[in-house]
Image: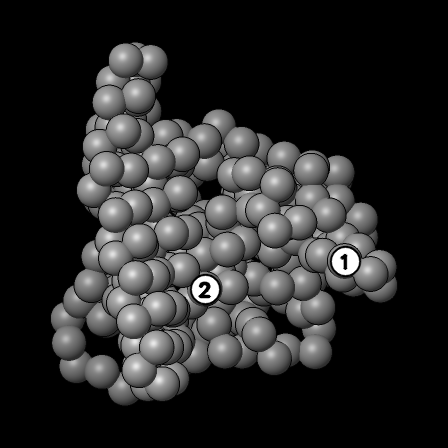
């Protein structure tokens, strides 16, 4: 992986430096005052920029009629899968959203090192692409990630087809329930089912195209990842 951000404007480089600082500060705060051994040993191993800002294909047009702005896609790798649980990162996500020095939206994915290495060894191409295109913003040491296994076209198609068959029908089922509840004027329940339908749709798209969907209920976050896979969604 690369480590240079020279292709980015200085303003974006400063923002990313601020993002890295916030991640470290909030992680340290989340682990403070604990007696649990796994927390005491807790470390951030790598912080990696991936997606459009890593590739150089980002869009930053907040003042246009469309008002579209690409997210910073960030993968944080920690030394324990337990430390990737949302309760250790909720405050980080909130602070990144409201910090005045970070004007670009940030999408954060956190995984344990063993989990990421297993993904790579299994040929999970979302993480293989990160390994190929990502930019290291921070690393504790120069220990490399696992060598990725390359899936054949036949295997990749089979996996994608299975994900779509397993996930997309759920999105349609949630949508059917939404329409039924709307007919009964149960608006709050309909809104919940509609959220489930949209979440399942984004998840189906991500799993089909990348073999990965993060365990998130945040539609804006999921949409940002989906838009990075198919830019036609920007206009949808």
Please state if 11 lies on the left or on the right of 77 as rendered: right
Along the viewing direction, whichever of 156 and 132 lies nearer the viewer: 156
Judging depth in this view, the residue of 209 and 5 nearest the camera is 209
Query: Tag 1's secondary structure?
Result: loop
Q: Secondary structure at mark 2?
A: helix
- Quickly name the residue at label 2: 219
Q: Residue tagged by mark 1?
A: 66
- Asked if residue 176 shows in the view, the reply is yes
Q: Is residue 177 left or right of residue 56?
A: left
Say which label, 1 or 2, has the lower sequence index: 1
Q: Position of residue 148 (x, y in %)?
A: 32, 24
* Residue at x 61% of width, y 51% of height: 236
Instruction: Give how far apart the Cα atoms at labels 1 and 2 are.
Output: 19 Å
Mark yes or no: residue 47 visible.
no
Residue at x 22% of width, y 32% of height: 162
Residue at horizontal 42 percent and vertical 67 percent from the top: 218
Residue 64, percent across and down? 84, 59
Seen at 24% across and 22% down, the residue is: 158
Expressed as whole percent of the image width and height from the top left, the position of residue 214 reads: 34, 53
């Amino acid at each position: 992986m690369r480590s240079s951000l020279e292709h980015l404007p200085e303003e974006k480089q400063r923002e990313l430096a601020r993002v890295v600082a916030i991640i470290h500060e909030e992680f340290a705060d989340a682990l403070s005052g604990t007696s649990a051994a796994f927390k005491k040993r807790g470390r951030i191993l790598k912080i990696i920029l991936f997606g459009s800002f890593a590739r150089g294909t980002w869009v930053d047009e907040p003042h246009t009629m469309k008002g579209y702005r690409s997210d910073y896609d960030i993968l944080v790798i920690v030394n324990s899968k337990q430390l990737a649980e949302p309760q250790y990162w909720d405050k980080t996500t909130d602070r990144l959203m409201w910090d005045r020095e970070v004007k670009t939206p940030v999408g954060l994915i956190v995984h344990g090192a063993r989990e990421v290495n297993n993904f790579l060894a299994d040929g999970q191409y979302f993480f293989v692409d990160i390994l190929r295109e990502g930019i290291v913003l921070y690393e504790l040491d120069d220990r490399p990630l696992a060598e990725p296994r390359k899936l054949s076209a036949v295997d990749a198609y089979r996996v994608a087809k299975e994900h779509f068959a397993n996930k997309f029908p759920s999105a349609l089922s949630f949508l059917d329930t939404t329409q039924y509840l709307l007919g009964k004027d149960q608006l709050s329940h309909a809104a919940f089912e509609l959220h489930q339908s949209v979440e399942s749709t984004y998840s189906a798209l991500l799993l089909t195209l990348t073999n990965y969907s993060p365990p998130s209920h945040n539609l804006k976050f999921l949409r940002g990842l989906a838009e990075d896979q198919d830019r036609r969604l920007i206009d949808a």
